[in-house]
Image (tube, helix red, strand yellow):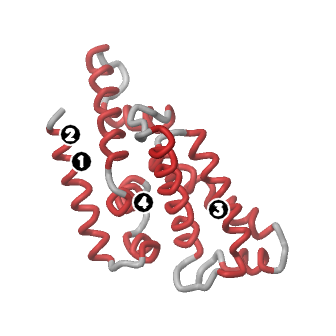
Amino acid sequence: MDEDLPAIERIRQGDESGLRALMADHREAVFHFTLRYCGNEADAAELTAETFYRVYKNAARYHPRARVRTWIFTIAANLSRDFLRRQKKRRGEVSLESTATGQAQRLEDTLAGPGQSPATGAASRETVHAVQAAIQELPHKLRFPLVFCVLEENPQEECAAALGISVKAVETRIYRARKYLRERLEKI
């Protein structure tokens, strides 16, 4: 049984404690997902808030075809995709240089250890920016599975349920996303 169903029921009955429970359980994961998807902390915070607002407003229409967590991430992914589309129209293109300090720091930590030389540190930062830029260039159908399953370490089954595709299709999309990133980063 989905442990989040009672929270949805409470929301349906007008009890905001259900929303608080869902936010306590999933807000951080949704924030990290939107941060990796959009690359900007302020936008990620706004998208996270909008995600839970939509959860609250649409709880009455939720049908347990998939887990509540999967439904929440589907909302977050759709909002993130739409946000990036609006940004692209507004600015002419999505900024590939925007970085999220928290995310970049974690990524840099995995690329170079403490006590690194300035040259190594600069190379690590360049690599982080190149990876972030390449992820931002991925189309939604490849970006969502990569961010959701690989970077955020969620099960492929949840991704498949969120996208309405098979687990094999998720595996294929992750493979294609990795291949694209590998090819893109080899050019740098």
The front one of 62 and 30 is 62
- Residue in view at x 34 percent, y 26 percent: 125
Mark 4 vs 1, N-terminal side: 4
Q: Quadrant of residue 22?
A: bottom right
Of tags 3 and 4, the one toward the viewer is 4
Categorize mark 3 by other alpha carbons within 10 Å: few (<14), some (14-19), many (20+): few
Residue linked to disc 3: 25
In the displayed structure, does residue 70 sit left or right of residue 92?
right
The front one of 188 and 157 is 188
Q: Which mark is residue 148?
A: 4
Residue linked to disc 1: 181
The front one of 153 and 170 is 170
Give the CA distance from mark 2 to mark 1: 6 Å
Above or below 137: residue 105: above
Three-letter residue code for mark 3: Asp
Expressed as whole percent of the image width and height from the top left, the position of residue 41 reads 56, 39
Give the CA distance from mark 4 to mark 1: 16 Å
Expressed as whole percent of the image width and height from the top left, the position of residue 90 reads 51, 42
Q: Which mark is residue 145?
A: none
The front one of 107 and 52 is 52
Give the CA distance from mark 2 to mark 4: 21 Å
Mark 3 vs 4, N-terminal side: 3
Question: Which image quadrant: the C terminus?
Answer: top left
Of tags 3 and 1, the one toward the viewer is 1
- Residue in view at x 53 percent, y 85 percent: 65
Contact, CB < 8 Å: mark 2 with mark 1?
yes
Three-letter residue code for mark 2: Leu
In the displayed structure, does residue 156 sit left or right of residue 176?
right
Mark 2 vs 4, N-terminal side: 4
Contact, CB < 8 Å: mark 3 with mark 1?
no
